[in-house]
Image: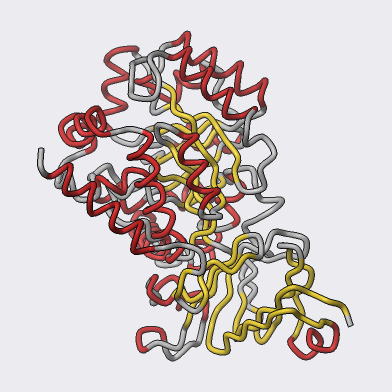
């Protein structure tokens, strides 16, 4: 018999690729952190001698969820600036607090809090965009979380850098050392928005992104105010300006993309831009409802993200899938728009494609990393089960997440974290709340 490290047995399995497939009573064999076989249980037991058997008889196994856009450290600002539209939320609520509180210590504590929250919610990879990205990377590695670390860039001083040249220099350092070949951490450039970039900075960014073969993620067409202001100042829409800077290509991750024309969607499709849809944040900040079904119809890869906990206010990808599916139906005026299988694909394989990681994660396939999430469907709110995919998207909540593996490592075992002192991380967050509230 062939030896394997772990054999996972689940009642149902949705591999995501191929699309709309639901497997029943299959086993997943994992060795050295990778999926080595997906077979019916009887055949699996005849073939493999596992070191560990994880039996989940009433559960659904899916690829680990991918949060394709968040600001992890902003978890410490959760609930701090409420009931405001985006521009006022930033200027009156967030930026003053960032100026006062952002530091390596704050980013470390906030990022670890966010990572624990995401792990318990079935997330196995997140794409971040915040200051002190090297600290976010260290936090992800410490907690064995997979992450795409976005290095910020803008033309004004922040606690992390003084000017555009320093942002670019620090970003280049992060690419080269010490995370160049780390199995869990990769990096991209993350300018805040077109408003935050001068033409000169944008051109330098394009050259560096091309040289280092790195993706670029940017908030784009998030609100009508953003578009109106750019039209007044420059006589063009933000996407047009980004195109003129040479940044609209297959390496671009356009975050939000709420207000898109049909021509802009055709442009995205033609050059291979990915969109990260953040429906919860868009709703809470009253930014609008993105035309997601139209994007998908145009052939655009649409991923799913929570945005930060300061604007969502949770890092809950199960909830985000449900919101995306329901909003998509209303926006398209079509009950068949954004079916459950598509919402799940947006939260897994589409996210992996947006991050350039789809050869390694995003689906349950032989040879891929064993980044897996298991959900208990034997709950009063998710029984009876006729369609496991629909049940996952429309009925389940994150309290039903039972198990999470990243690279084959069992990080959440039957609801309990195996490698993190959650109480210690929670206590640090409480101390931050007391510190911030006292001012």
Q: Residue at x 37, y 56 (%)?
A: 315
Residue 137 lies left or right of residue 327; in this view the side is right
Depicted 427 relative to depicted 208: above or below? below
One can see residue 263 in this view: no
Residue at the spot 43% in from the left edge and 37% down from the top edge: 129
Q: Is residue 157 left or right of residue 191?
A: left
Residue 357, position as x, y percentages in the image: 65, 47
**Residue 292, relative to residue 201: is it above or below?**
below
User: On screen, 38 above or below 317?
Assistant: below
Q: Residue furthest right?
A: 1
- In the rendered image, the residue lying farthest to the left is 438
Q: Name the foreground residue: 27 vs 294.
A: 27
- Between 339 and 434, the one nearer to me in the picture: 434
Q: Quadrant of residue 212?
A: top right
Res. 92 in view? yes
**409 shown above or below 168:** below
Q: In which quadrant is the N terminus drawn?
A: bottom right
């Amino acid at each position: 018999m062939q030896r394997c490290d772990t054999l996972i047995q689940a009642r149902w399995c949705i591999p995501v690729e191929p699309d709309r497939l639901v497997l029943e009573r299959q086993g997943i064999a994992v060795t050295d952190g990778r999926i080595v076989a997906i077979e019916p249980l009887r055949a699996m037991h005849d073939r493999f001698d596992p070191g560990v058997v994880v039996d989940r008889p009433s559960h659904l196994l899916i690829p680990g969820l991918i949060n394709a856009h968040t600001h992890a450290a902003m978890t410490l600002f959760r609930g701090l600036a409420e009931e405001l539209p985006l521009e006022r939320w930033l200027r009156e609520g967030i930026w003053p607090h960032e100026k006062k509180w952002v530091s390596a210590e704050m980013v470390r504590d906030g990022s670890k809090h966010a990572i624990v929250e995401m792990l318990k919610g079935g997330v196995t990879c997140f794409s971040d965009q915040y200051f002190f990205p090297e600290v976010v990377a260290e936090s992800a590695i410490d907690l064995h979380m997979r992450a795409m670390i976005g290095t910020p860039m803008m033309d004004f001083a922040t606690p992390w850098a003084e000017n555009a040249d320093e942002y670019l220099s620090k970003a280049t350092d992060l690419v080269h050392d010490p995370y160049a070949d780390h199995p869990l951490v990769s990096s991209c450039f993350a300018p805040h928005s077109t408003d935050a970039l001068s033409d000169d900075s944008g051109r330098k960014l394009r050259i560096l992104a091309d040289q280092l073969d790195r993706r670029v993620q940017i908030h784009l067409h998030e609100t009508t105010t953003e578009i109106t202001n750019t039209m007044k100042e420059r006589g063009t829409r933000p996407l047009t300006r980004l195109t003129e800077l040479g940044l609209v290509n297959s390496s671009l991750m356009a975050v939000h993309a709420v207000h898109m024309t049909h021509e802009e969607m055709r442009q995205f499709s033609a050059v291979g831009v990915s969109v990260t849809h953040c429906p919860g944040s868009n709703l809470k900040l009253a930014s609008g409802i993105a035309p997601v079904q139209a994007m998908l119809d145009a052939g655009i890869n649409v991923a799913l993200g929570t945005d930060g906990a300061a604007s969502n206010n949770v890092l809950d990808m199960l909830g985000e899938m449900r919101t995306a599916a329901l909003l998509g139906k209303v926006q398209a005026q079509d009950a068949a728009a954004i079916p459950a299988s598509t919402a799940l694909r947006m939260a897994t394989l589409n996210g992996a494609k947006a991050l350039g990681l789809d050869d390694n994660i995003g689906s349950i396939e032989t040879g891929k990393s064993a980044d897996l999430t298991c959900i208990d469907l034997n709950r009063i709110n998710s029984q009876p089960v006729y369609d496991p995919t629909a049940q996952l998207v429309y009925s389940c909540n994150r309290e039903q997440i039972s198990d999470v593996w990243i690279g084959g490592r069992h990080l959440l075992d039957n609801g309990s974290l195996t490698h993190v002192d959650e109480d210690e991380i929670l206590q640090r967050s409480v101390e931050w709340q007391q510190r911030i509230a006292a001012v």
